[in-house]
Every structure is written in C-alpha cells, then in structure tokens.
Image (cartoon, rainbow, N blue to C red):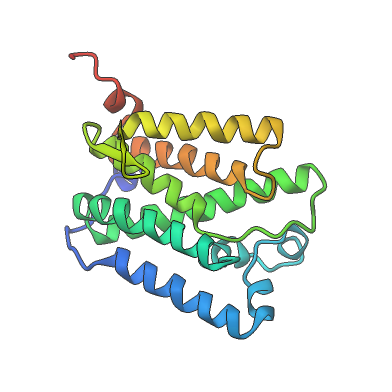
C-alpha cells in the first residue's frame, strides 16, 4: 500500500455532533481560566516555552480565549460552519481536520514568531482552526449564501477571499494589532492543503468552476 492511499484512506462515516463537543470543551476551558488566570498562561502558545519542551502548547492554545467576546465569536463561527462541514465529512474526518489544521496553524505561527525573535508572544484562540473550517465550508458548499451582519448576502467563496485579503492587508500594514493574522492565514492555507491531499478537493476549483 503506497503512502498516497494511506493518506486518503477514509473513515467510516459517523455523525456524533463533534462540533458541539468542541464548543463545550472551549466553554469549559474558558470558565476554568476565569477561575484561575494562571491556567490561561499554561495553555497559551509561547515560543519561548515551546523551545523548552512544552510542545503540547501547540495544541492547547486553540482551546484558550482571552475574553467572552473572543470566545463567543469563535464558537459562533464554529457552530454555524462546523456543523455543516461535520455533517458532510463525518465526525472523525471533521475532528482530524479541525485539530490538525489548528495545530499546524499554531506551529506556523511559532515558526514565524521564532524567526522574528518574538519569543514572549502569547497566542491563544481557536481562530486558526475556525478559519480552516470556513474555507472547508466554502469548498464543500460553494453556492451557499452568507448574510454578513445578517444583511449583506455574500457567496461563501467570496467571503473567504475577502477575509484573506483583509488578513494579508492587516498583517502587512499592522491593522487590528493584537490579532493573530498569520495564524488565520495559516488556517486557510493548511485547510486548502488538507482538502487537496486528504480528500482530493481543490478548493479554488470549487470556488470558480470552469464549466459555469
């Protein structure tokens, strides 16, 4: 059996509401960090701590949030988009997708921070994985219409491209300081690679089909 077939070996389809479990875990962790702020520090991805052997921070950072609004909007995005993606892929595939893209987005951010000497940067939040879920939603349901602010109708692929442009501009010109733009972009990038390598889905071709 070659490596390509191993990478694409499918899980048996099952649906277990993994999205709701992820939301519950995030909410539970948030309340624990409110009770003990030190707990938040021990979950955050800090490059200086990672190089000292705390590699698990590349995983735990995505379950910690800095405030109720940070948690609310991330979980709202996970609920709206994650539920549909999970139903399409199955719970096992969805969990692998969510956790792997989140870890890889954190690892990419670690590399970027380390390369620029930002050793004491605290990275928290599920945004990298949420952006990955958004791209997966747009690739799986390219005809879907999302109403931004509940008013403006936008096709899902257009929303992904708009977010990408905003994140690139924000990173280059330091807009919205304190927001992990590179982590968001990494979420998009690793989601694209996951869909292509694991599921043989080319997101950009789904966004702009040639037979239209």
Residue lying furthest top: 211
Q: Nearer the viewer, residue 200 or 66?
A: 66
- On the image, the x and y values in percent for residue 27 come to 44, 74
What residue appears at the point 65 percent right and 43 percent down from the top-left corner? 176
| The quarter of the displayed image where residue 191 is located | top left
Report if residue 127 is visible in the image.
yes
| The quarter of the displayed image where residue 148 is located | top left
What residue appears at the point 40 percent right and 34 percent down from the top-left corner? 160
Residue lying furthest front: 151
Q: Nearer the viewer, residue 159 or 191?
A: 159
Q: Is residue 36 left or right of residue 10?
A: right
Q: Relative to 3, does residue 73 appear above or below in the rendering? A: below
Report if residue 2 is visible in the image.
no
- On the image, the x and y values in percent for residue 14 come to 17, 62
- On the image, the x and y values in percent for residue 46 come to 71, 61
What residue appears at the point 33 percent right and 71 percent down from the top-left corner? 21
Q: Quadrant of the C terminus?
A: top left
Residue lying furthest right: 117
């Amino acid at each position: 059996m070659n490596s390509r077939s191993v990478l694409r070996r499918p899980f048996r389809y099952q649906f277990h509401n993994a999205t709701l479990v992820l939301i519950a875990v995030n909410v539970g962790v948030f309340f624990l960090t409110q009770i003990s702020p030190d707990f938040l520090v021990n979950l955050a991805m800090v490059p200086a701590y990672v190089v000292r052997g705390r590699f698990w921070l590349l995983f735990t950072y995505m379950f910690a949030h800095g405030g109720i609004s940070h948690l609310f909007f991330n979980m709202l995005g996970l609920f709206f988009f994650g539920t549909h993606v999970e139903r399409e892929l199955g719970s096992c595939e969805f969990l692998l997708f969510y956790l792997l893209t989140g870890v890889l987005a954190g690892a990419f951010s670690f590399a970027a921070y380390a390369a620029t000497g930002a050793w004491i940067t605290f990275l928290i939040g599920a945004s990298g994985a949420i952006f990955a879920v958004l791209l997966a939603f747009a690739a799986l349901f390219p005809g879907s219409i999302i109403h931004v602010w509940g008013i403006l109708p936008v096709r899902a692929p257009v929303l992904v491209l708009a977010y990408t442009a905003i994140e690139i501009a924000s990173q280059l010109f330091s807009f919205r300081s304190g927001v992990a733009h590179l982590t968001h972009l990494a979420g998009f990038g690793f989601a694209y690679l996951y869909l292509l390598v694991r599921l043989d889905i080319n997101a950009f071709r789904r966004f702009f089909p040639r037979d239209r």
